[in-house]
Image (cartoon, rainbow, N blue to C red):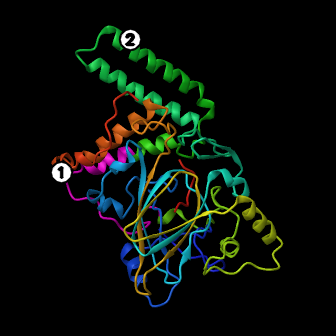
Amino acid sequence: MVEPMDQKSKQFGTGVQRIPMTFGDFLTSLQNKKGPYHYLTTQYSDDDDVPETFPPPTNALKDDFPLVPTLMGNLVLQQVNLWVGKSKEGSSSGLHHDFHDNLYCLLQGRKRFVLYPPSQSHHLHPHGKIKKVHPNGLISYEHNPVRSDGLNSYDAAKLKTSALKKRLSEVKSNSKSRPVDIKMAKKAYEEARKAFRALQGDAPDPDEADDADAILARLDALEKKNGTSGDEEEWGGIGDSDAGDQGDQADEDPSSFSGVPTSVLHSHLNLPTTTSPPSASDPSTPSFISSLKSAGPPFIVNISAGEMLYLPASWWHEVTSTSQSASDVHMAFNYWFHPPNALDKFALPYKDSVVWKYLRDEQRVAYSSKRGVKRKTEEKDAPIALTKPINKKKRLKL
C-alpha cells in the first residue's frame, strides 16, 4: 500500500485512504516530472491490523541487515520498514508518536525532526484519551491500556503461559533434570495458566487478533517462510495481499496523532513549510498556538544520508522529508523495538524477563532457520548474551 498526500493540508499522516500499487508502478510514478508523489510507508499482512516483522520489500533484503544491531543490545524487534518518497520542497508526516522504540537510518535525502517528549502530551492535543504515561515514556490510552513494555495484562499472561509451557517441556526432556526441577517448572506453569484463565473476561473482541496472537503469528509466519526449500512466493506488489479488504472505509484519526495542524506548528516555530498556511479565521488556531507555547521549545534535529536517529517510544515527532534534487527520492530504513522498561539494565531491558526472553529466543530461531552457516559468520553482530532467565495501536507510524 502507498499513501497519497492529503490535498487539503499538503501533508501525509492525515488518515487518507491508502491505495494498493505494485512496487514497479510505484517506482515508475516517482519518475513523473510533477508531484505530489505517493509515499511508501508501513506495510501490513493479510490481517491489516497485524504488521509483519519483515514486510515487503524488506523481506527480500533481510540477509543484508542484522536482526538486532549490536548497539540495541537485547531489545526485541517488532518490525522493520523501508520508507520511500519524493519531494524537493519537503513533505510532512504530521505530528504524532509511535508505540515502539525507533532506530531511524536515513539512506538518501534529508529529514528534519521536530521532537516533543511524552511529558508534554497534554499540550499536544492527541486524538486519543491518555490514561497514563509510563516512567519509560510509553503512552497508554483509555481504549487500549498497556503496561510499560507495550503489552496489556491479557496478552502478557497469555505469552507468559506459552513461555512457561515451553520451559516445562524442556525441563522434562532434559535427562539431567531432577524431580524437584520438574516440580518447580510445573508449578510455575500451572500458576501462569491459572492467572491467564482469570483474565479470560479481559480477552479482546473475538473478531480482532490480540497482540499476543499477533506476535506469535509473526514468528510462526517468519519461521515457515524461512523454512521453505523452494523459491519464495512472488510478491505481487505493495498491498497485494490486503488490497481487497480496503473498500471505501475511511480511516479514523489514530489516537497517537496530534490535532495540531502542521501548518500551525511550522508557523509557530518559524520553520519553512509546504503545508497550507493556517487560516486566520479558524477559531481553534489561537488555542493550538497557546498549547504549543505551553509545551515549550521542541528539539529540532536535522539528519542527512548516512546518519541515524534513535527515538524512544511515544516521543512526539513531526518529520519533514526532502529529496536532494528534483529527480531524487528520499529513502530511509528503520527498526521498531518493543519498548524496554528496565532502563538501568542494558543486558536485561525488560522487567518481565520470562516473556521477553521467550519472545526474543523464538524470534532469533525463526530468523536464523534459513540462514544456516551464514548466520554463524554474523555472531559477532549479535546482541549481548543473556545471563539470566528472563502493540501497537492500529495504523499509521512513521
Q: Is residue 357 magenta?
A: no
Q: How many marks?
A: 2
Residue at (52% x, 39% y) in the render: 341
The vertical placement of 246 against 264, above or below, is above
Q: Are marks 1 and 2 in contact (CB under 8 Å)?
A: no
Relative image position of residue 38 (x, y in whole percent)? 49, 77
The vertical placement of 374 against 43, above or below, is above
Residue 34: which numbered mark, if any?
none
Compared across the picture, whether 141 is left or right of 149 comes to right
- Mark 1 or 2: the one toward you: 1
User: Which class describes the residues within 10 Å of circle 2: few (<14), some (14-19), or many (20+)?
Assistant: some
Residue 183: which numbered mark, if any?
2
Q: Secondary structure at mark 2?
A: helix
Q: Identify which residue, 121 or 175, lies in the foreground.
A: 121
The furthest residue to the top:
179
Relative image position of residue 160 (x, y in whole percent)? 46, 30
Residue 374: which numbered mark, if any?
1
Relative image position of residue 161 (x, y in whole percent)? 46, 27
Compared across the picture, whether 69 is left or right of 94 comes to left
Q: Quadrant of residue 360?
A: top left
Q: Identify which residue, 29 or 148, lies in the foreground.
A: 148
Q: Quadrant of residue 205?
A: top right
Residue type, mark 2 in image: Lys
Range shown magenta: 219-242
Residue type, mark 1 in image: Lys
Q: Is residue 125 visible?
A: no
The vertical placement of 352 against 206, above or below, is above
